Image (spheres, rainbow, N blue to C red):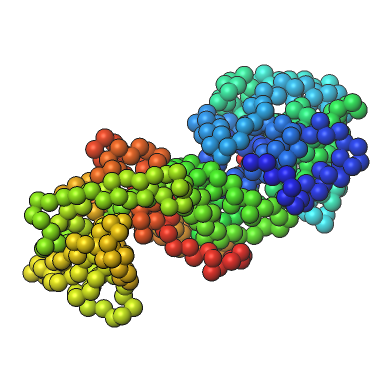
Amino acid sequence: MSDKGKSLNFIEHIIEEDLRNGFPDHLLRFRFPPEPNGYLHIGHASSICLNFGLGLRYDAPVNLRFDDTNPTKEEQEYVDAIKKDVEWLGFSWDKECYASDYFQQLYDWAEALITDGKAYVDSQNSGDIAAQKGTPTEAGTNSPYRDRPVEENLELFRKMKEGAFEEGAHVLRAKIDMASPNMLMRDPVMYRILHRAHHRTNTDWCIYPLYDWTHGESDYIEQVSHSLCTLEFGPHRELYDWFLDQVTASDKVRPKQREFARRNLSHTVVSKRKLLQLVEQGHVNGWDDPRMPTISGLRRRGCTPAALRSFAETIGIAKRENVVDVALLDHHMREDLNKITPRVMAVLDPVRVIITNYPKEGEEWVQAENNPEDPNSGHRELPFSGELFIEREDFREEANRKFFRLKLGGEVRLKNAYIIKAESVKKDREGEILEIHCTYDPKSRSGSGTPESLRKVKGTLHWVSARHAIRGEVRLYDRLFSDPTPDGHKEKNFLDFINPDSLMTVTAIMEPGLKDAKPGERYQFQRLGYFCVDSDSTEGHLVFNRTVTLRDTWAKIELKQV
Ligand code: ATP
Ligand code: MG
C-alpha cells in the first residue's frame, strides 16, 4: 500500500517543508481522531487514508485516538465499530488512545492556568455568556466574574470537579481577549459540568473538557507532529495554538494543525448526526444497512477495502469543499470486483425455457470459467438439462434487429452451453408467458470443437437448469436519496429526498454451486452485476446484496463536480 513515488498533496508539501527546515523525520507522528458518537462514513475513509497514508509514506506511527469528551453521545458500541472499520480498511495504528485517558492531565493543566491568571470560573448561565460574546465586528463584554481572585477560582473549580454544583451552575473559561477579532478567542469555555456517566471513566468525572481544550493538548501528550482536521476548524487554529502555548515545553514536539476540505458524496449525506437520524427513524435497517454511506454499510454491500482506498486516493484531498459523484465510487468497486470475483449464473426474474428436442430427464455438465480475469481461478462444472430458466427481459416474442437476445424464430447461445432457437410460447390466461419452447443444436456445445460450436450468434444469455437450481433472496439497491445533494437545500430537509424505491427484494434462481456461499463472499452474477452474501443469510436461506451493476456510467461522466 505504499504510495511512495506519487505526486505530493498539499499536506505532504507542508511536511516536506518542515523536514527541509530541520524537523527530524523520526519525530513525525499522525493520528486519526474520531469521536465515538456514530459509525464511520465514507468521508472518514478519506481522513483515514490521508493520515494512515502519511504514516506509510513517511514510515511514521499513526495513533487511533478516540475524542471521547462528550458522554451524552458516545458509546462503546461506536468505539468497537470504528476499530473494526479502520482495520478492515487495511490500516494498523500504533497506539489506541482516548482523550478520556488525559482527563487528569487536562485538569492539572487547567488548575495551572487558573493559578497563572489565565482561566476563571464564570457563574453566569450560557445565555448570558452568549449575549456578551459580541459580534465579529463588535467587541464582547467582560464577564462580571472575569477578575475573580485566583484562590476563589481554584476553590470553585475544585468543587465543580467534586460534584458540588448542578449542571450549568458554573463553567471554566480561558481568559484571553473579549475584543479579539476571532470570536473563538473571546474567553472560550474549557469545562462544563455534566452529571453523566462516561463509557470509560464512568462517574469519575462530572466536569468534561470541551473540544478546543482537549484536542491540541491530546495531540501534544501523544507528541503528534501534524494534526490534520477539516476546514471548519480553520478558525480554531489560533485557539489551538494559544492552548499549546500554555503547556508546550521547549524540548517537546509542538503539534501543528492544518486543515483540508471535507469530502461529500453525491446522493447521500455524510454527517454522523444525520446518519443517526436515518437509523433512529427507521429509514434504513441500522448503521450497516447496505444503502448507508458508512464503512460498515459499504462493507456489507460488498465493497472491498481496496476499492475504498483507491477511491479515496483518486479524489485525493483538497483545500475547498466539493461533492464527489457516487458513480466514481461505483467505478472503483467494479474495477476491483472485476478482478477478484468468481463468475456465477443467477436469474433474477425467471421465465422457463423447455428444450423440446433434449432427452427427457437428461442432464449433462458443462464447463465454465470461474474468472476470465484471473488465469489461476480454474473452471467449474455446471448442470445443464432440458428445462432452464432465463431472464424474462431476455426474451421477446417480436423484436427488431437490434434486439440481440432471444425472440421467436431467433437463436442465442446459452453461455458455456448450446445454441437454442425459440419456437413457440405458452401463456396463462392473462397473457403472461409461462414457458418458451425451444429447440437446441446438439452439436453446438461450447468448447466441443465442432464447427457448430464455433458458429457465431449475436446474443449470449445466462441461464440456470431448473431441476438443479437453488433459490435465494436478492436485495437490489438504488440510491438512498433521489437528489444529488439532499442536504444542500435551504427550504427542504434532507429526509424529504429519501428515495422510496431504494430497496427491492426478489427471489432469484441460482446455480447449485452457490448453496455453500458464506456471508461476506462476493460474486459476479454474469450479465447482472456484483453481489455479496449478506449477514442475514442462514443455512438454507441465502441472501445476497447487489453491490453494483455491471454497467459503468462513470466512464461517460468523467471526474466532474455535481
Ligand atoms: P460528522 O460531522 O460526520 O460527525 P465529524 O467531523 O464530527 O463528522 P469526527 O469523528 O469528529 O467526525 O471526525 C474524525 C476525523 O474525520 C476528523 O479529523 C474529521 O475532520 C474527519 N472527517 C469527518 N468527516 C469527514 C469528511 N466528510 N471528509 C473528510 N474528513 C472527514
Ligand atoms: Mg464531531
Residue 6: percent from the left, percent from the top? Answer: 72, 50
For the N terminus, the image quarter is top right
At horizontal 26% and vertical 48% (from top left) the residue drawn is 382
Residue closest to the far bottom: 400
Query: Is residue 273 at least partly visible in the picture?
Result: no
Q: Taking the image as four quarters, which one is ligand 1 found in?
A: top right
At horizontal 23% and vertical 74% (from top left) the residue drawn is 410
Viewer-closest of 156 and 394: 394
Left-right relation of 452 to 531: left
Left-right relation of 551 to 18: left
At horizontal 21% and vertical 62% (from top left) the residue drawn is 443
Viewer-closest of 32 and 119: 32
In the image, residue 460 sits, relative to residue 343, either above or below, namely: below
Q: Quadrant of residue 320?
A: bottom right
Q: Quadrant of residue 187?
A: top right
In the image, residue 321 sits, relative to residue 220, either above or below, namely: below
Residue 512: percent from the left, percent from the top? Answer: 25, 44
Viewer-closest of 216 and 56: 56
Residue 126: percent from the left, percent from the top? Answer: 68, 40
The mark tally for this picture is 0
Query: Is residue 364 at least partly visible in the picture?
Result: yes
At horizontal 89% and vertical 42% (from top left) the residue drawn is 20
In the image, residue 335 sits, relative to residue 142, either above or below, namely: below
Viewer-closest of 481 and 30: 30
Left-right relation of 35 to 238: left
Q: Quadrant of residue 16?
A: top right
Left-right relation of 547 to 186: left
For the C terminus, the image quarter is bottom right
